[in-house]
C-alpha cells in the first residue's frame, strides 16, 4: 500500500465548528459584540470589587472602647455584654468578647476594652486600630472640665492617625456618668472639644508637611482655613449620653440604650 498524500489526510474534526463560530461572529453587529465584551468586563470588575469590599468589612469587625482612666470604659464593657453591674479596677491590658448588636440582622462585633493609662493607650490602639469598625470614645462627663485638655490630646492622636483616617470607622463619643448631677451634656462636651482640638491643631500644625499635609504618620485634622468641627472628619461622628452605673447605683440598671442603638446601626 502506498503512503497517503496530505490531501488524503483527515481534516481536524474541530475545524468545522471553529469555522462556523468564525462565520457567526463575522455576521454579528460589531456594536453588539462590543456591548457583550463591555458587559463581561463590568461583571468581572464588579466581582473583584465585591470580594474586596466584603473582605474589608469582615476584617474590620471590632468595636474599640477607648478613653482616659476612670472614664467608665470597663463597666460600660460589662454592661453592654451582660447588663449587670460589677465593680471594676483600672485596666492594664485589653479585654474582648463577642457582642451581639440589638438589630434585626443579628450583627455580632468583637467588643474590645482598651487600657486608658497614658503609658499604655498608644500601644493598644496601635494593636487594634486596623480592625476597628467603630470606636467608642468614653468621656467622664462629671469631671470633663478638669480633663478637657487630656481628652482632646487623646482624641487628636486618634483622629490624625493615618490608619484610622483611611479606614474611617464610626466614632461614638459616649458622654458617660450622666447620673451625676454636675455632668456636662453631650452638646456642651462636643462644643468644648471642638474648640480645644482647634487650639491643638494650631499649636501642632508646624510639624505637618506643607506638601501633603502629613508627616510622621499623622494627617491634618479637619479642613485647612476653617475652625475645626467634627463634621469635617472622614468618618461618621455621633455624641451621645449614657450612664454605665445608672441613677440607682449598684443595684439599678444602666442607661446605655442610646449607645446600644448606635451600635445596632453599624
Image: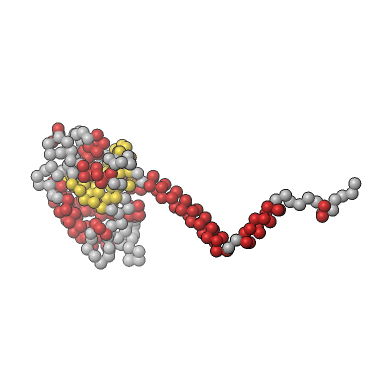
- Residue furthest right in the image: 1
Of residue 34 and residue 59, the one placed in the foreground of this image is 34
Residue at the image position 24 percent from the left and 34 percent from the top: 82
Residue 66 visible in the displayed image? no
**Relative to the observer, which residue lies in front, 31 or 82?**
31
- Which residue reaches farthest left? 181
Residue 25: image x %, image y %?
Answer: 62, 59
The residue positioned 60% from the left and 61% from the top of the image is 28
Colour basis? secondary structure
In percent of width and height, residue 193 lies at 19, 55
The total number of labels drawn is: 0
Residue at (29% x, 41% y) in the render: 103
The residue shown at (23%, 61%) is: 228
Pick the residue in front: 179 or 127: 179
Q: How far across and how far down the image is residue 219, in percent?
A: 32, 58
Q: Please identify the quarter of the rendering in which residue 33 is found.
A: bottom right
Q: Is residue 55 left or right of residue 92?
A: right
In percent of width and height, residue 160 lies at 29, 56
Amino acid at each position: 500500500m502506498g503512503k497517503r498524500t496530505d490531501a488524503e489526510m483527515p481534516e481536524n474534526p474541530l475545524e468545522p465548528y471553529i469555522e462556523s463560530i468564525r462565520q457567526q461572529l463575522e455576521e454579528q453587529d460589531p456594536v453588539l459584540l462590543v456591548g457583550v465584551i463591555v458587559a463581561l468586563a463590568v461583571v468581572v470588575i464588579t466581582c473583584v470589587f465585591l470580594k474586596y469590599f466584603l473582605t474589608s468589612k469582615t476584617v474590620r469587625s471590632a468595636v474599640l472602647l477607648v478613653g482616659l482612666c476612670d472614664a467608665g470604659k470597663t463597666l460600660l464593657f460589662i454592661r453592654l455584654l451582660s447588663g449587670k453591674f460589677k465593680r471594676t479596677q483600672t485596666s492594664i491590658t485589653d479585654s474582648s468578647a463577642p457582642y451581639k448588636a440589638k438589630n434585626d440582622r443579628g450583627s455580632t462585633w468583637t467588643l474590645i476594652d482598651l487600657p486608658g493609662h497614658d503609658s499604655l493607650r498608644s500601644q493598644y490602639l496601635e494593636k487594634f486600630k486596623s480592625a476597628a469598625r467603630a470606636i467608642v470614645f468614653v468621656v467622664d462627663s462629671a469631671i470633663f472640665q478638669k480633663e478637657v485638655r487630656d481628652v482632646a490630646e487623646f482624641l487628636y492622636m486618634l483622629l490624625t492617625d493615618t490608619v484610622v483616617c483611611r479606614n474611617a470607622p464610626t466614632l461614638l463619643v459616649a458622654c458617660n456618668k450622666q447620673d451625676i448631677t454636675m455632668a456636662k451634656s453631650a452638646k456642651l462636651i462636643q462644643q468644648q472639644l471642638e474648640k480645644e482640638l482647634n487650639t491643638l491643631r494650631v499649636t501642632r500644625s508646624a510639624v505637618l508637611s506643607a506638601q501633603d499635609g502629613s508627616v510622621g504618620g499623622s494627617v491634618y485634622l479637619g479642613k485647612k482655613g476653617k475652625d475645626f468641627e467634627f463634621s469635617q472628619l472622614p468618618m461618621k461622628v455621633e455624641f451621645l449620653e449614657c450612664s454605665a452605673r445608672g441613677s440607682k447605683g449598684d443595684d439599678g440598671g444602666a442607661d446605655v440604650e442610646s449607645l446600644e442603638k448606635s451600635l445596632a446601626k453599624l
